[in-house]
Image (cartoon, rainbow, N blue to C red):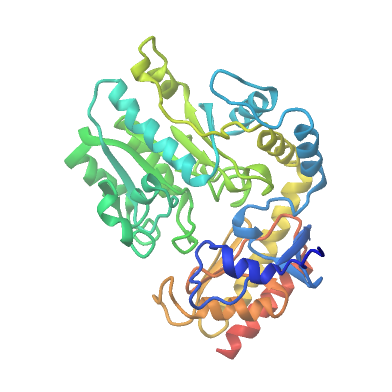
Amino acid sequence: MTAQPFDLAEADRRHVWHPYTQHGIAGDPIAIARASGAYLYDTNGRAIFDAISSWWVTLHGHAQPEIADAIAEQARTLEQVIFAGFTHEPGVRLAAELARRAPAGLQRVFYSDNGSTAVEVAVKIALQYWQNRGERRRLVVALENAYHGDTFGAMSVSARGLFTDPFADHLFEVARLPDPVEHDVVAALERLIAERAGEIAAVIVEPMVLAAGGMRMWPAQALAGLRELTAAHGILLIADEVLTGFGRTGPLFACEHAGISPDLMCLSKGITGGFVPFGATLATEQLFAAFRSEDRKRTLFHGHSYAGNPIACAAALASLALFGDRCAERRCTIERAHLRAASRLAALPNVSGARVLGTILAFELGAPDRGYLSGVGPALRTFALDRGILLRPLGDTVYLLPPYCATEDDLARAYDAIAEFTEAL
């Protein structure tokens, strides 16, 4: 019997449930056959500039040879082993390398498999830390307009709204600090501490950028102020660097803008250069010591089947090895291009709040405050795709977050497409 040709589009329509997609109105997704550098190539051979690093994960470029080679070599040696009761060289080497590069004091590394689970681990460590010490501190403090992931703990510490409404009755209590872009968040935390100091276990923040909340960039002084307050009152500070880690905002970690070290730091997205899913939660030795005991009940009862996966660890090590002078210069080139583009775009009608931090350029487009369901985002996405550029606005917030290999010509094409769309509004 002759095998029937595989109809990819029809099989996708029949069997696949895509993330953040309303299948009742979405058209067929674009089938990608391969990728290289800053470009994706569809099954018809069309090149698409990946201006958002495929959901913020691709750091150096697609199919980066050094990372691909490291994965292939590791896969032929050791592809997976349970990380409870066993260990392996890539996992230990990566932990040591992360500890060396991270803000001072973050010496312990707990592996998971994505950004949301890295946050779950951090929140669980923070809460159980106090329980292990015999103190009842159960309150977590988070920022308005924050986003930390889609699992239940991560949703709880994220802003309530469109993403969390269906699950609101199942999320735990969180105290909210106002959006640090518009308010004095340090004074707000001072007031909260005065009222509930003995209850607060931890404060969780996205340092410098509230990412999915609209690429909202906030001051380093405020971050430093939060660290000073939490340290003074013995409250744990969790830095969610899932997006901001690995150079996205300029330095390797966004906490460096404020010169601070958190008690816990969550990493994912770019940690493997965008090749394979992986997550890591870094903690201080003080936190680890509260779990180390002869009492088995003090164990952190958390784990993932693929925690410390050797292939992912090898990919992460290969990615970190690429952070040299050349990578730093590429990031500076992108930032300079973004700053020039921000001045140009800010002069256009319908554009407001143009801002740049490291390799991130963002602004609002159209009437303000339309939010995530604004129609301008999907319209721009379609317009840009027709011109071979991948954008995915956050409602009325447009942003570029390209791989570090993106050239000034690549970026110019994206800026031009956005300007053309904006002028036609």
In this rendering, the answer to whether 37 lies above or below 174 is below
Closer-to-camera residue (150/179):
150
- Please report the residue visible at 61 percent of the width from the left and 27 percent of the height from the top: 95
Residue 390 visible from this viewpoint: no
Q: Quadrant of residue 78?
A: top right
The answer to whether residue 176 is left or right of residue 223 is: left
Could you tell whether 334 is left or right of 352 in the image? right
Above or below, 298 relative to 240: above
Q: Residue furthest bottom?
A: 424
The N terminus sits in image quarter: bottom right
The percent position of residue 134, horizontal first and vertical second, equals 25, 21
> What residue sits 67% from the left and 79% below the top?
417
Depicted 394 relative to depicted 234: above or below? below
How many numbered discs? Answer: 0
Q: Residue visible at 74% across and 69% down?
A: 48
Q: Position of residue 331 (x, y in %)?
A: 70, 53
* Quadrant in which residue 415 is drawn: bottom right
Res 46 quadrant in image: bottom right
Q: Looking at the rendering, in which quadrant would you find the C terminus?
A: bottom right
Residue 246: image location, x then y, percent: 62, 45
Is 268 positioned to the left or the right of 396 in the image? Answer: right
Q: Which residue sits at x=72%, y=79%?
A: 387
Residue 124 screen position, x and y as percent: 37, 34
Furthest-front residue in view?
Answer: 1
In the displayed orientation, state which residue is furthest to the top.
294
Residue 186 or residue 6, whichever sits in front: 6
Q: Is residue 425 left or right of residue 40?
A: left
| Residue 408 in view of the camera | yes
